[in-house]
Image (cartoon, rainbow, N blue to C red):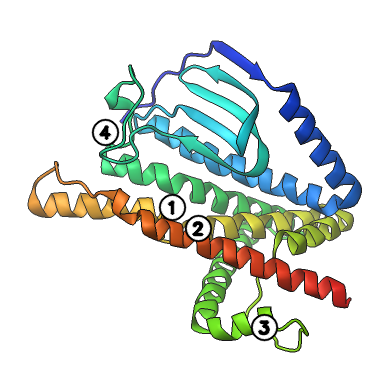
Amino acid sequence: MAIQAVRTQVEDPRFSPLWFVASAASIGFLAAVAPGGLYLLGFLGLIILTHEAGHLVVARWAGMRPSEFFWGFGPEVCSVTIGDCRYGLKVLFLGGYVKIEGMTPASEIPDGFDESGTYRAASHWGRLATILAGPAVNMATAVLAFAAVEWRNGATFVESWRTALGLVQLVITATAASLARLVAQLGSYVSAVIDVSGATEAPVRFLSPVGQAAISGQVIERGVGPSLQWFGILACAVGAINLLPLPPLDGSHALVAVFEGFVQRVRRDRTITFDVTKLVPVAYLTIGALVALSVTALILDLRDLAVS
C-alpha cells in the first residue's frame, strides 16, 4: 500500500444561495432560541469532521480514491472538487460521510473510475484500517481532551495520559453497559416512556439532543476545562457506538473485512467475498432502533423539562 499523490487544483465550485440562506437562518434561530444547541452543533461538527477525515486519510493510504467528503445530508449548500474528491457542506448538519466507490462486490462504479481505487480492490488490512480509522480518531481526540484537562489541573504529563486513557475506558464501558441494560430491561424502559405521569422510572436513560444541548450550554459557561471534558465524552461515545458490529455502523464493515480475510485464508481462495447486501434488512432494523432510542430519549427529556 502506498499513499497516492493528490492533485491540488480546485475545480467546479458550486454554491446554492437558497440552501445557504436556509442554513444560516436555522443557525441564527438556534442561536437565539437555544444557544446550547448551537454549542452542541459545534461539538458534534468537530467530532464528525475528524471522524470522516480519519476514514478519508487512511483510505487514500490504502490505495482507495474517495470521491466525496461532506458534512451534513440533504441538498448541497456549497462544494468544490479538489483532486479526485468533492468536498462540501449539506443543509442538514446531522452527520457526515466519505463516499468510497465499490463498497460491495456487486456495486456499480461510475464510468471511467479505475477499479483499483475502489474499496473492494483494497487489501483486507487496508479495508479494516480504513473502517477503524474513524472511531480511532474519535478515541484519540477524546484522550487528548481528557489529558488537556488533567494537564491544566496540574497533573504531570504521564499522569494526564494515564487518567485520560482510564476515562476513555470508563466511557466505553458505561456506554456498553447502558446498551446492554436497555436490551435486558426493554419492557421496563418502554413502560417508563409511555407512562405520561412520569411515575415509572426508566431503568436506563440516554440523552436526546435536547439534553445534550442543555449540558453543552452549561459547560461552555463553566469554561474550557468542563467543555473539553464534555467534548471528550461525546467523542468517545460516538466512537464506541460506531464500533458496534451492526450494519450500517463501522463495526459491521470491520467484521465483514475480518471474516472475508479469515475465510479466504482458510480456503486459500482470494475470490471468496461476502455479499453485504444480505445485511440490508439488519441495517434497516439498526437504523430503526437508533431512531426509536433517540425519540424515546427526547420524550423523557421533554417530560423532565415540563416537570421542572
Position of the N terminus, as image quadrant, is top left
Q: Check disc 3 and report its element: helix, strand or loop.
A: helix
Q: Check disc 4 and report its element: helix, strand or loop.
A: loop
Residue 192: which numbered mark, if any? 3
> Label 2, on which residue?
287
User: What residue type is disc 2 on?
Assistant: Ile
Tell me which residue sits at (48%, 34%) in the image. Answer: 56
Q: Marks 1 and 2, how far apart in space?
A: 8 Å
Q: Marks 2 and 4, how far apart in space?
A: 28 Å
Of pointers 2 and 4, the one earlier in the residue sequence: 4
Q: Marks 3 and 2, how far apart in space?
A: 22 Å
Residue 50: which numbered mark, if any? none
- 259 is higher (above) or lower (below) than 78: below
User: What residue type is disc 1 on?
Assistant: Pro
Question: In the rendered structure, are the residues bearing label 1 and label 2 in contact, judged by CB atoms less than 8 Å apart?
Answer: yes
Residue 189: image location, x then y, percent: 61, 81
Of the pair 29 and 139, the residue shown nearer to us: 29
